[in-house]
Amino acid sequence: MRADARRNYDHLVATARAVFAEEGPDASLNEVARRAGVGPGTLYRHFPTRQALLVAVFRERIDTLCAHADDLAAHAAPGEALRTWLRAVLLHARTDGGLSATMASGVDLGFDCHARMRSAATTLLARAQRAGAVRAEVSADDLFKLVTGIAQVADDQSEGERLLALAVEGVAVHPS
Amino acid sequence: MRADARRNYDHLVATARAVFAEEGPDASLNEVARRAGVGPGTLYRHFPTRQALLVAVFRERIDTLCAHADDLAAHAAPGEALRTWLRAVLLHARTDGGLSATMASGVDLGFDCHARMRSAATTLLARAQRAGAVRAEVSADDLFKLVTGIAQVADDQSEGERLLALAVEGVAVHPS
DNA sequence: ACCTGAACACCGTTCAAGT
DNA sequence: ACCTGAACACCGTTCAAGT
């Protein structure tokens, strides 16, 4: 990779991060290119699709979430570890909406973003299920879909957490 | 309202129904106008916003859902009535995606669409709560947000119903 | 190799001009 | 009154021409 190409690549990612944060994941790609000071063609050369650009931007966040999952698996009670992680996923999905779509899309991207998230979720989920805290028939994908669905309709994080808690505990009353 | 205006209005609604069904709620309004054989200005004159057009299209469906709710309130067991209705709402929200956004948006539209859905939901919900079948702290808006969130991420109706059942019964295991 | 930016086919929206 | 459709400012995407 030539030096100027590398520089453009990095600068595009940084600019895209800012633009997505400001205007959401539907922001104009032409504007990203404009603000990065390159032609639109350069953006498309590096990132043939909007998804590709989103993934580049979110990569570290996904790393962070996975690390958080490892930490919780090592130090927190099974049920609470899963709940806490889902709230963290919700926060990220809400903050930059694109992450949400990216996770729920199921399409596997250039690198193993989806796979890593799935594996982090599976670890926490299996642990909670072994402890008898979560229904056996629940899958990691179920959880992602619920969280990303909630992320898309919640007006703010606290409403999102409320809905998430509702889904986790159940809308229905259970005989106790 | 002049006769040609009335005719255009009706034809636009019918065309929009078809176009939204084909291409989803983000379909091009210019194309709706084109297929209806009128200028884009005419569309905007009748429906100043996309929401206004969506509401006109979905009006009957909303009527149907409300009637369904009344029927269930009269004939089904409280908890099951609510569940059945939520599945019906999910189906409609999934079928024409716009209904989903319309309901969750919370903005009150020209006519009482949102209010009527809310009242239908509240009736079924209150009944289920009185019967002790649903948590007391759950609100009608909570239910709409959950259903519409699920509608947006579910790939098909059966997956949606699965997620809905999960949220209603709860992801967590409850001591019994 | 890589970048540029004009160009294309679209979009939503407006508004002068017509009937 | 109501409709028309050209016009404007955008968008995503491509691709010949440059360095």
Image (tube, coloured by chain):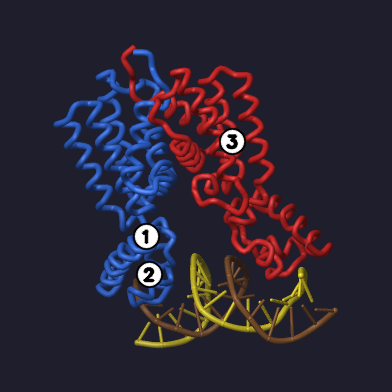
Chain colours: A blue, B red, C brown, D yellow
Chain letter, disc 3 residue: B
Gap between marks 1 and 3, in whole Å?
33 Å
Chain letter, disc 2 residue: A
| Local secondary structure at mark 3 | helix
**The N terminus of chain B is located in which quarter?**
bottom right
The residue that disc 3 covers is B91
Type of the residue with mark 1: Leu
In the rendered image, which quarter is residue B26 located in?
bottom right
Can see residue A107?
no
Closer to the camera in the image, A73 or A173:
A173
| Local secondary structure at mark 1 | helix
Image check: A40 left or right of C17? Answer: left
Asked if the residue under mark 1 is in contact with the one under mark 2, i.e. CB atoms within 8 Å, the reply is yes
Instruction: Please provide percent x and percent y for residue B6.
Output: 79, 59
Name the residue rendered at 42%, 23% in the picture.
A172
Type of the residue with mark 2: Val
Asked if the residue under mark 2 is in contact with the one under mark 3, i.e. CB atoms within 8 Å, the reply is no
Can see residue A56?
yes
The residue that disc 2 covers is A32
The residue that disc 1 covers is A53
Say if B147 sits above or below D5 in the image.
above
Q: Residue furthest left?
A: A75
Q: Residues within 10 Å of mark 3 (few under 14, many from 20)?
A: many
Image check: A52 left or right of D5? Answer: left
Gap between marks 2 and 1, in whole Å?
10 Å
